[in-house]
Amino acid sequence: MANKIPRVSVREQDAKVRATNFEEVCYGYNVEEAQLEASRCLNCKKPRCVEACPVGINIPAFIQEIVSGDFKKASSIIAEDSSLPSICGRVCPQETQCEGSCILGIKGEAVAIGKLERFVGDWSLENGAKSAEVAPANGHKVAVIGSGPSGLACASDLAKWGYDVTVFEALHKLGGVLVYGIPEFRLPKEKIVAREIESLKALGVKFETDVVVGRTITIDTLMGEEGFDAVFIGSGAGLPRFMGIEGENFNGVVSANEFLTRANLMRAYDEEYDTPIYVGKRVAVVGGGNVAMDAVRTAKRLGAEATIIYRRSEAELPARQEEVHHAKEEGIEFRMLTNPTRVLGDDKGWVRGLSCVEMELGEPDESGRRSPVVKQGSDFDVECDVVIMALGTSPNPLLKQTTAGLETTRRGCIVADESGATTREGVFAGGDAVTGAATVILAMGAGRRAAKAIDEYVKSKK
C-alpha cells in the first residue's frame, strides 16, 4: 500500500561543506524520487492538506499528476492558486500547514508536499510551462505597493482576471523580503526568485522599481490623479526592533534586517562585490525565529563562530524545525533559556560581549508558550564581537503619515479586515504590513484574499 512506502529523503550538501559556501543546501527531488514520493499520497476524498494551505492549492490533484508523469498538468493545477511554487516549496513551513494536516503524518511520516511543489515549480521554470490563462482586459487599473509575497500574489490574481496591474517597489530589485531577507543558500535569487517574477510579467503585470510610495508618489496621487481604481499595500514590515538594553549603541550591534540585507540584496558574501559586512571572530544572534536562523547561518558562512541566544527552551523555538536541524548540523551553538541584559563594549566603542541571565519557564502567555522568568543570581557573560538582534520587525510608518484616512494599530500595523479592506475606501492591505512579521505563504494568502475583495469592490463601482 502507498502508506507503507517510507518518505523519500531529499539529497543535501554535506553540512561541513555547505557551512563554508552560499550554495543551496537542499538539492530537491529528481523525477524518480518525486514520483515515488508522490505515490505515497492517499488522494483523500476530503483532503485536510488543502484546508491547511493558506492559498488553497489542490494538493492531491497536482500530486496525482506527478505520479502519472504529466508535470505540465501538475504545474497548471498549482498555477490556479499560486504564482510562486518554487519559492513556496522551499521556504513555507509545511510541517505546520499542509504536511501538518496530512493523514499519513498521524502514525507515520507525512507526504513531502513542499518538496513536491518545489519539484513541479522548478520543472516549470526549466521547461517554460505556460502560466495560467489571462482574461481579456477589463479596463481597470490597480496599484500594488511592494513586490514581496503578498504583493506578488495579489498582482498575479488580478492580472489573471484582466486588470491592468502595476507593482511599485521601493528598492532597486524586485522580490521584497524574498531577495533581502532570505539567504541564497535557502532561496537562490537569480535561479528562482527572478524567474518566478518573470512568470508574473508574462501575465501582464508591470513593475516599477525605486519608487518609495509616500515620498516619490503618494496613494492619494495614485488614486486621484493616476487613475488607479484601487490600491493594495503589501509593503511588509521592515522596521527592526531592539531590546532597549544598555549598550545597544555600540559598534557591532546590528539588526538582522540590516545584516541580511547587506548579505543578500547587496551580496556582501560575494568577493566580486564591495559591500562591507563585519562579523569579527564571534557573532551572537538574539532571537529564535526563522530570521534568527538565517542570520546565524549567514554569519557562520562568513567565517565567524556563531551562537543563537534565546530566552525560552528549544521546544518553544518559533523557527522551522528544518532550519534548526540544518543550523545544528552546520555547527551553530544554541544557548537556550538565556536572555541578554546589557551589551558590553570596549573603550573604543566596539562590542566585546553580552551580559546575560539564565531563565526559567513559568506560566503560558497569550501565545500559549510558557513565559520565561529570570533565575536569580544567574548572571554571566558571553564573549562576542558582533550582536545581531533578530527580535521581529514593524511596518514603516511612512504610508500612515502620507495617506488620509488610513488607520494603524499602536504597533504601526495597518488596520484591515479579513478581506484586506482598510479604513480608507479603495485601499486594501495584507501580509506583514497588517500582521507584523509572519511567513511568506501567509502573506500570499492575504494577497489573494485582497485581490478577490478588490475585484468585488471595483465591480460594485460600475
Image (cartoon, helix red, strand yellow):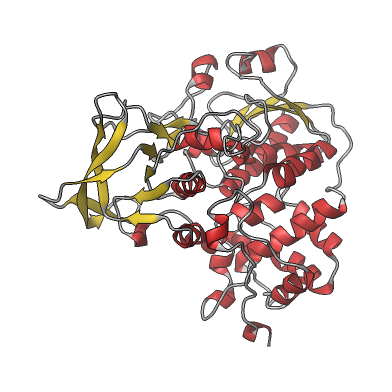
Q: Residue 328, located in which quarter of the rendered image?
A: bottom left
The foreground one among 237 and 401 is 237
Q: At 84% across and 70% down in the image, what residue appears? A: 69
The foreground one among 133 and 277 is 277
Measuring from the top left, give residue 76's x and y in whole percent: 82, 56
Q: Residue 178, located in which quarter of the rendered image?
A: top right
The foreground one among 161 and 4 is 4
Instruction: Answer left or right for 192 relative to 410.
Output: right
Instruction: Answer left or right for 364 relative to 459.
Output: left
Q: At 73% across and 77% down in the image, what residue appears? A: 36
Q: Residue 162, located in which quarter of the rendered image?
A: top right
Q: At 75% across and 67% down in the image, what residue appears? A: 30
Q: On the rendered image, what quadrant is the N terminus found in?
A: bottom right
Measuring from the top left, give residue 307's x and y in whole percent: 37, 50
Residue 67, visible in the rendered structure: yes
Measuring from the top left, give residue 256's x and y in whole percent: 45, 37
Residue 58, visible in the rendered structure: no
The foreground one among 262 and 444 is 262
Instruction: Answer left or right for 437 relative to 455.
Output: left
Q: At 26% across and 40% down in the image, what residue appears? A: 354
Measuring from the top left, give residue 95's x and y in whole percent: 53, 63
Up-down relation of residue 4 to residue 430 (above or below): below
